[in-house]
Image (spheres, rainbow, N blue to C red):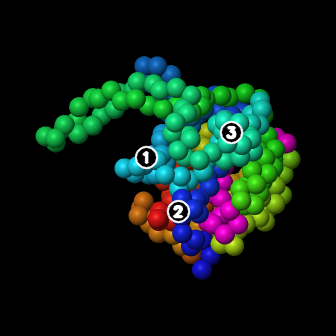
Amino acid sequence: MPYSAEISRSSPAAFLFLLDQSASMQEPFGGAEEKGDAAPSKARVLADVMNRLLQNLVLRCAKEDGVRDYFYVGVVGYGARVQPLVRPTEALGTALDLIPISHLAEHPLRLEERRKQVPDGAGGLVEQRVRFPVWFDPEARNGTPMCQALDLATQMVRRWIDLHPHGFPPIVLNITDGEATDGDPLRYARTLCSFGTDDGEVLLFNVHLSSVEAMPVELPDRMNGLPDAYAEQLFQMSSVLPFSMRAAAEQEGYAVSMDARGFVFNADPVALVRFLEVGTRPSTLR
């Protein structure tokens, strides 16, 4: 059965996130209302969501003896430049290498103090100050070189597969708010997904961030009903969810079919967080 390889320290999983940092990411999510100050930009919300997701991945690997390297992670931004936003030290590899989760945990860009609502034990909430790790900051400039980002992703996952040919295939999550400005990304997506391990081909999931107030299209199994050719292209670029991820999607409240793809169109912040929870749960850790 494909996509069933055990995930352990000797056979870790790989996550590679591709983040749109084009100029349009300066805009707020569609339908965002101003409450005193201006609504935060998509770039700001995405950076916060991703930094929190990285923290959650660290916590999922935290045991009594420390953070275990069940996961290796990469984050690539594409806008004014196409470049890794988190990098290993020279001793661990090059910019094309994914980073062990323990190393990521030990090397945030900085720690910020933030406020968080937590249960007070009596049915209410109380505000608590917490330390929040930040690995990268928001950026929004220039065009959307998605093809270059997918090409870099291909190079990175091929290096990973050479070192881990029998493990769970790498998972690439592309988060964008617009069309590629440097060519046809479908061709690059198909090249990326043509590589794989003994357990299956590389998985590519796509999330389109909403620029208008509209209901998100979540985990569809067909192109019928998608709003335009761009949505159809992202659907074609997206992999079918493996069984374990369909189970995770059902736990999150999605109604999914056997052919559901890892694709969300017109995602608001809630839909983004909800899907990332599914897309980063490939299997049970051992």
Along the horizontal axis of the image, is 108 left or right of 98?
A: left
Along the horizontal axis of the image, is 60 left or right of 17?
A: left
Along the horizontal axis of the image, is 283 left or right of 229?
A: left
Location of residue 178 with respect to 22 vertically, above or below: below
Q: Which mark is residue 234?
A: none
> Whole-Å distance between the Cαs marked 3 and 2?
23 Å
The one nearer the camera, 285 or 144, is 285
Q: In the rendered structure, which segment of residues is drawn in magenta? A: 164-182
- Residue for badge 2: 8
The residue sitting at 46% across, 19% down in the picture is: 37
Q: Is residue 104 magenta?
A: no
Q: Residues within 10 Å of mark 3 (few under 14, many from 20)?
A: few
User: Which image quadrant is residue 44 in?
Assistant: top right
The three-letter code of the residue at mark 3 reads Ala
The residue sitting at 61% across, 39% down in the picture is: 211
- Give the overall secondary structure of the magenta segment: loop
Which residue sits furthest bottom? Answer: 1
Give percent across and percent down for residue 14.
62, 55
